[in-house]
Each structure stands twice: as C-alpha cells, then as structure tokens.
Amino acid sequence: MGRLGMLLHRGPLTLLFDYGLLPSRPPQYPIEAPPVDALLLSHAHLDHSGMIPWLTAAYDIEVYGTPPSLDVADLLLEDSLKIANNEGFRTAFDSNDLIRSRKTFRSVQFGDALDFGGVEVTAHSAGHIPGATMYEANLEKTVLFTGDLHTLSTDLVLGAKAVKCDILVLESTYAGRQHPPREIVQKEFLKKIREVNRRGGVAIVPAFAVGRTQDILLTLARERFDTSLDGMGKTVNSIYSGHAGFVRSVRKLHDAMDKANVVSGRRGLERALKGDVIVTTSGMLDGGPVLSVIERLRDDPRSAILLTGYQVEGTNGRQLVEQGTIDLYGVKIRPKCELQKFDFSAHAGHDDLVRFVEACDPEKVVLMHGDNRQILADALEGRECILPQEGEWVTL
Ligand SMILES: [Zn+2]
C-alpha cells in the first residue's frame, strides 16, 4: 500500500489518475499535485482517493468515478478526517473542503467514454472491489491505467478483462508473489471456524470495511454460522447493495448480509460473543470495534483471531503477527487466542499480472506500486518495461 497518483500530460491537457495518501499513523502525504484539468478515480481506497478534498480545494476541477467509488471514498475520507482529528495528526484538508469536494463528483459507468479536450477516456471494470475502474485514454496511442487490479472472479465481483492497448500502466503489488486458489482459502477458512466453534471458542475476523467484509460475509453464507457484523463494513454493505450493477450478485450479497446479525451497542456485543463468528473492523486492528472484541476474548485460548488481509508495517495487526502482542487502548497485551492468516487478497498475483499483460499486448508497460517490480519486468521479456520513481516523468 502506498499513496498513488499519476499525471497524464498532452499539450495543454493534464489529467490526474488517483491521488491518495498512506493512512498510517500519522498519515503520509504525496508530492503536491500541479494544476490539473480533472481527476479520474480508480477506486475508493484511501491510498488512491485520500487527497481528493485537498485537490478540489486547490483547483477548480471535477472528480470522475463510479457511484460506489465516489460514495465509499466519501465515507472513508470522512472517517480518516475523524481519526486524524481525534489523534491530533496534521491533515491536508478540513471538513469544509470535504463537503465542497462532493459537489465536484461526476459519476461514470463502465463503458462510458468521457471527452477531455479531444482525449477520449473509457471506463472498464478493474475487478479489485465493486466499482473499481481501469481507464483507457485514447491519445495517438492507447494508454490503459489499471489502478488496483484483480483478474480472477470472487464471490463479490467479477475479474477484470484485458483491454488491448499500446501502453499499459499496471499496478504490481504482488509482483513476484502468488496467491493460493480462492476456493482452497475459503474451504480452509470455513474449516478453521468450525474447529474453533467445536472447542467452544469464537472466531474473530478482522476485515477491511471495503470489499473484504462483503467477501467474507459471502464466504460465511455458504454455511450456517451464527455470524455477527460490526464496524464500518455495515455502511459499506448498504452502499454496495444500492449499486446493483457493480457487484457480482446483489441478491447473494443481500442474502449474506441478512444472515449476519448487525451489532449495535453493548448488548449487541454480548449477543455476538455468544455466537460463532464476529466480522469487524479495523482489518489491521488499529482501532474500531475489533479491539472491544479482543479485549473480551484475550484470555480465551479456544477463540481465534483470523486475519483476512495484508498487515501493513507499523500496524497492530503486523505487531500481532510478528511479536504476538497488540496495543489495546495504550496497554501492550498478548492475546491467548489462536492466530491464523488467510489470503483473501483482491489484487492480481504474479502469474495473473503476466497473463493480463500478455492479453492486453502493449508495447510498453509502466509498473506502478510494488516492492518487487523488477521481478515482474523480468517475467515480461520482450516488452519494454518502465519502473518510474516517485515524481519521475515518463515519455510515452
Ligand atoms: Zn485498493
């Protein structure tokens, strides 16, 4: 996870694709964007959307994205501002900037072709989370910007399809790494929950609110667990279920949501603790209702914490994985619960990326965020690969 932004320059026109921040503690901000003509948002995650209110306060522009991307970005931006203010972190914008930015939102559907001063930009599904978008810009050459990309279908969203292009700007988070098949991960995840329940424990499932919570609920709906849902995933659920065209099956998502008890208040938590599974935020154990659950079950070795996402360095989740401890309201504790990780990643793995490049068949590939971009570049032999540094300009 980083803070991503890409500028596309052509004559007097400058388009910005994504403009994010790293939601660490304190947040890390990107290089200041120069004046641009428009922002095209690939998806809602803060590392791609986190600077929108700063941008719209600085420049008189419009922000384009699919309805779920814009709605969820708005929710995440508000939440990030609340956290930053509570913890006394410096922010790049204030709540007035956020309120004003909403007026600049312009909704885009997959297949829509937008016109920016003669440059046509078409939106395609990126498969990463509902509404995640790849943008195809038609200059003298065709440039495809993937944003975060998932090419395999999950219960929540169908995988992205390749788009023929001359220049492919590709995310490469999982360059050099593969994911186990999703079916197998789901089976092992469900099996572990049954095992935890059989020995009298509760499965605590920290999950990111956006995408992951819904994926987990769809997986859990395959069996008859007593599932509880807490945290911001509840709000994201209702946003997604209002945008039927962007999830694989809105009916299945509704069913999965109906099967979970929504936790509210103290009594809700007591009720959840008597059940089988609690799905809650934050996914990296940095705040949110997951901490109250862990506080209650910390001395119960029958219960388990089942991590469902990548744990960024410096987070409580990473500390739990590496040292077996977490900071609970300022006190370091060592939960006695079992700990397991499950790979529910929403990013294409190494081989998926290679296959996607082959199918798009570009002459040049620009590799964006990833720690092992060179491994992917080596695997794409015969194609020109560019690995830009932060702030670097590339001539296409
Ligand atoms: Zn993302």
Image (tube, helix red, strand yellow):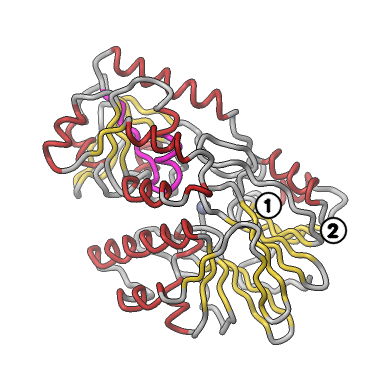
Where residue 24 appears, as percent x and y from the top left, is 39, 58
The residues tagged by marks 1 and 2 sit, at their Cα atoms, a distance apart of 17 Å
Judge by depth and name the residue closer to the eye, 149 or 242.
Answer: 242
261 sits left or right of 91 in the view:
left
* Disc on res. 373: 1
Check the image and name the residue furthest to the left. Answer: 267
The answer to which quarter of the image holds residue 74 is bottom left
Q: In the rendered structure, does residue 175 fall within the stretch colored magenta?
A: no
> Callout 2, which amino acid?
Glu
Q: Residue at x 32, y 44 (%)?
A: 281
Residue 168 spot, x, y in % from top left: 74, 58
Q: Residues within 10 Å of mark 1 (few under 14, many from 20)?
A: many
Query: Do the CB atoms of the residues marked 1 and 2 lie less than 8 Å apart?
Result: no
Q: Is residue 32 left or right of residue 355?
A: left
* Residue ID for mark 2: 363
Q: Which residues are magenta?
A: 202-216
